[in-house]
Amino acid sequence: MGLNIVIFSLFVSATLLLVSSGHAADDSERKAYIVYMGNALESKSLAVEHHHSLLSGVTQDEEVARQSIIHSYGKSFNGFAAYLTPDEAARLQENENVVSVFPNSFRQLQTTRSWDFLGMPLSVKRNTPKESDVIVGVLDTGIYIDAPSFDDKGFGPPPSKWKGVCQTGGNFTGCNNKVIGARAYSIGEATNVSAADDVGHGSHTASIVAGVPVKDASLYGIGQGTVRGGVPSARIAVYRICNDIGCSDIKILAAFDDAIDDGVDIISMSVGGSARDYHSDSIAIGSFHAMKKGVLTSCAAGNDGPDLASLANGAPWILTVGATATDRLFKTPIEIGKDMKTLGVSLNTFNLEKMYPLTSGAKAAKANKKDTYCSCEASLLDANKVKGKIVYCDGGLQDSIIKDLGGIGAVMSCSPNSLIGGTSYVLPGACVSRDTALQILQYLNSTKNPQGVIHKTIPVDTTAPFAASFSSRGPYYTSLSFLKPDIVAPGVDILAAYSKLKSVTGSEGDDRFNAFNIMSGTSMACPHASAAAAYVKSFHPEWSISAIKSALMTTASEMKVGDKFVEFAYGSGQIDPQRAVDPGLVYELSEIDYIRYLCKEGYSGTRLGLIIDEDVNCKSIPKFGGQDVLNYPSMALVHEDPAPNISAVFNRIVTNVGDGNSTYKAIVKGPAGLNITVSPDTLVFNKVNERKSFTVELKGPPLKGNFTILSASLEWTDSVRRVRSPIVIYSNSLIVRKDDYP
């Protein structure tokens, strides 16, 4: 069961990139497209020749075809990117050798305490020699090689399986025995791009996965402690596909093509976008070919929560990761007048030592202007009324404006999502809730000389874990038969490496440059899960990627906090890496299982054959039986609305990876009225790697009302290990009427 795991730490939102090609007749119509052609040919040179020939046949001009091609993919899968007119794209789609043609788009990017919170202290048991052989591919904004987290002291040469390169140039001077590979993609750009991280995101995610321990790390004293990655002995290979704007599909596929061929073991990708059909989703395509080569792709679920069906990267061959908070959050103390003390949300490295005059956007407006809603737009504010004061604004992005006008600080009313995970500002500042904002306004409007002060951010203990409100929720609208996200991991207020090529806030007027920063998002959760997968792999290098994914899901900690749709927020639960090393039983999936799934999703014929590199007749694929077609570790049933009684059967197969002689008994939990029958309810194993099948039958009355969900679970136990699978039954109205969520 060979395994390569590819860890992608990127999350990105989709906006169409319109690129002029500089060609002749129909330049204005030409835009960047990706032509996906399935599995790789025998050699990349053969693929390049084929791409030119194919495009020449469409353009009827070899020179135009040659100038139009942006990039050819041919190492790990087959395809190319080119500037095309809509008509040319349509004609290419009709070709029997083409799986899909879709526009290039841009996706968006989506720790001292977190690993301790997950039960992974510095002293945790490790298989260091094997961990040092694990190569994590991080697709992100590059890396700041001089950060202390990437010091290679004590590391030997790269593993012999490594076939990648280290591209130097610009601000990137070279790799080391920790960061063993670096590529940067300038595809379709006029200037060359360096692998040096001038955004900070890539360094942050890479260090969460595999940064070495660094003592006394902090953001100017905030969060001080030892910062480290989950697998500090693992190697890192970076693939720069993103910048401040986002990450293009063309570069994403180029990085997958290279990373799989380079020999990475895990791809960590904190990038995503709106959900799409698999054949036009660059991440789904790249991760599918990674899966075929035994490489696990771990992806961020997205930052568009708490709406249901907002999740991205939901293909079943992807490990989809949502975000939770740990038991430590950062809060900023605020004093308003003599009697009001509250905690705002920010990462305030400044410390005002006295009270300052307090005003609002409305009171600081120019004489001939009105700022009734305290929007604090620059054109409305009078600098003389702002200078030397703390200003209340309704919004959350006005700190630079207040600083430019001479203000001392900013207190801002922010959306609920902005109140989970702090943000740094260019001056003393913090977000407050709407209720707190109303109290501040009442004080301002009733006090002759209002005053306030904003103190430096402090750590605050809280009950955890809980799903972050910004973390995107399932179900995944293109695939409703399994639960997504798969798991959750810490993604709020995470301290990790940063880049000194970027200021703390990224603003030009910010003179704070630090080797560490604190960030929040599913971008931070994803590398935690990627590291957990690498940790399991270091103990079981022979396990398949589906076995590792199953181990992480079935040993995850069930979360008991949240709303009635909580399973769509946390999936199987929060990762527990130490338990995942010894899961007892695993649910395995092979390529044929995914082919069966694609057949069910409507893929067939020649185009499906191109993807898997062989002729496929969906009717000849062995049936799995039961409600769904995948041996997935979780179970989900979409109930038609209105519908008859609940009636479904799930077929599953588990493989024993624990003790040779072992007996597991089934324990089911569910709401009253839902009957769950497991047959057989006892599994007896006589050897390791022995497989046993069972069924889970659900019967019950119809779901009552719209937006209904029933939560249940199946747990296999040998009295030592617990192998848990969530079971969710939900109304299809959760999808059909997405805009009407209660």
Image (spheres, helix red, strand yellow):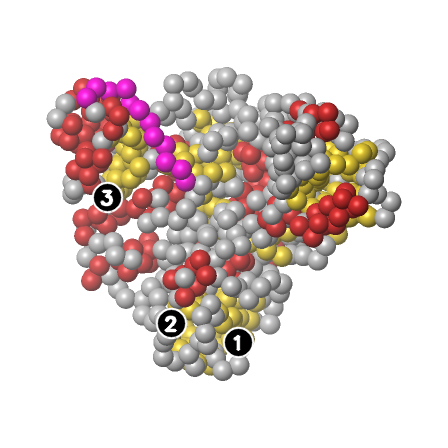
- Locate residue 528 relative to residue 41 in the image: left or right: right
Judging by the rendered image, the residue that carries numbered circle 1 is: 670
- For the record, the magenta segment spans 14-25
Residue 99 marker: 3
Front residue of 671 and 654: 671
How much space separates mark 3 and mark 2, taking CA atoms?
A: 35 Å
Residue 431, x across and y down, in percent: 68, 43
- The reply to whether the magenta stretch includes residue 464 is no
Judging by the rendered image, the residue that carries numbered circle 2 is: 641
Q: Which is closer to the viewer, label 2 or label 1?
A: 2
- Disc 3 is placed on an element classified as loop
Q: Residue at x 56, y 38 (%)?
A: 205
- The secondary structure making up most of the magenta span is loop
Q: Is residue 680 visible?
A: no
Residue 620, x across and y down, in percent: 20, 62
Q: Is residue 594 above or below residue 183?
A: below
Which circle's residue, 3 or 2, is located before the other in the chain? 3
The crowding category of the residue bearing disc 3, from other C-alpha atoms within 10 Å (few below 14, some 14 to 19, many at least 20), is: many
- Disc 2 is placed on an element classified as loop
Front residue of 299 and 188: 188
- The reply to whether the magenta stretch includes residue 21 is yes
Residue 82 marker: none
Q: Residue at x 28, y 60 (%)?
A: 600
The amino acid beneath tag 2 is Asp
Residue 223, x across and y down, in percent: 73, 40
